[in-house]
Amino acid sequence: MALHPQFPTSPFAPLIPEQRWFPADEILRSTSYEKLLPPLVAKVRKEVQNWRDKAYPGASSTSVALLRHWFDTEHLTENADGSLSPFRYYFAQREAVETVIWLHEVRKARDKYDLIRFDASGAVSSGMFDEDWPRYVLKMATGAGKTKVISLLIAWSFFHKLYEADSDLSRNFLVIAPNIIVLDRLRADFDGLKIFFNDPILPPNGHEGRNWRDDFQLTLHIQDEVRIVRETGNLFLTNIHRVFLGEVRDPEVPPVFWTGG
């Protein structure tokens, strides 16, 4: 397996489908690219790239305003010593956010049947999935910035629900960590909602005629520390063990046998 000769070295550079890594030798790219990738990925990547290149047609004004602010605007973030540094989102983060917005808002993918239409392998069927609710899965490498993607999508859903009259999204969110270690890391990012203000997630008031920062009223609840649930919006952060807590039987105390002298 080798990288395409024109594969970019910068994590900020856009990746076009014809130059992306795939799990085979380059000589098989023209005949096996779609077959060797996970189902749905190849077609979705190509259509999202085309949507991006055309400046997001079909998206709501709220979505376009956020996408342009996040990815087409120059940002400066403050360092610990008070100095400022340029900030850009990695392309992997940008593509993940764009994909979810495109699937939900442009292609109206609301269930497994809508998603299966993007399968290029022919290996996926509706019988593989029990649920009928929409499920968008983003598979990202360790260190690619999943927390930043989560925060961007939370902001998108929040503002879409607030500003778009026909929105079926939500201003209430549940983020589930896979273990206590990850939960502690998420707590450090989300405590005080600081990730939304430290990163350039919230556009300044007045951007596209909206008061984004004033309107972003989200209450954070961590594990069992549930505060007053507010109508303006809530973010619940917990660990996977809390979800299954009611299904876990109490451990039985085994009998003790003394066999020593």
Image (tube, rainbow, N blue to C red):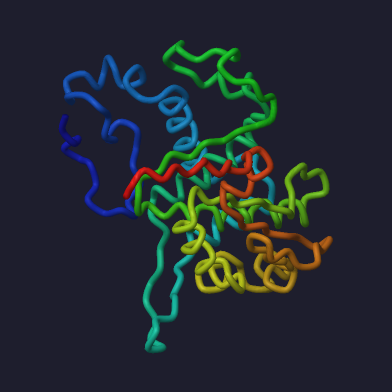
Q: Position of residue 257 (x, y in %)?
A: 44, 42
Q: Is residue 58 left or right of residue 151?
A: right
Q: Can see residue 209? A: no
Q: Quadrant of residue 68?
A: bottom right
From what the image shows, is residue 190 above or below residue 250? below
Q: Relative to the observer, which residue lies in front, 100 or 179?
A: 179
Q: Residue at x 60, y 33 (%)?
A: 135
Report the residue at 63% width, 39% height from top: 249
Image coords of residue 258 (percent x, y): 41, 45
Give the residue drawn at x 62%, y 23%.
Answer: 112
User: Could you tell whether 178 is left or right of 205 in the image?
Assistant: left
Please identify the residue farthest to the front as the structure is shown.
Answer: 261
Q: Position of residue 144 (x, y in %)?
A: 37, 52
Which image quarter: residue 230? bottom right
Q: What is the total number of numbered labels drawn onto the structure image? A: 0
Closest to the observer, 194 or 101: 194
Q: Which residue occupies 48% across, 30% down?
A: 44
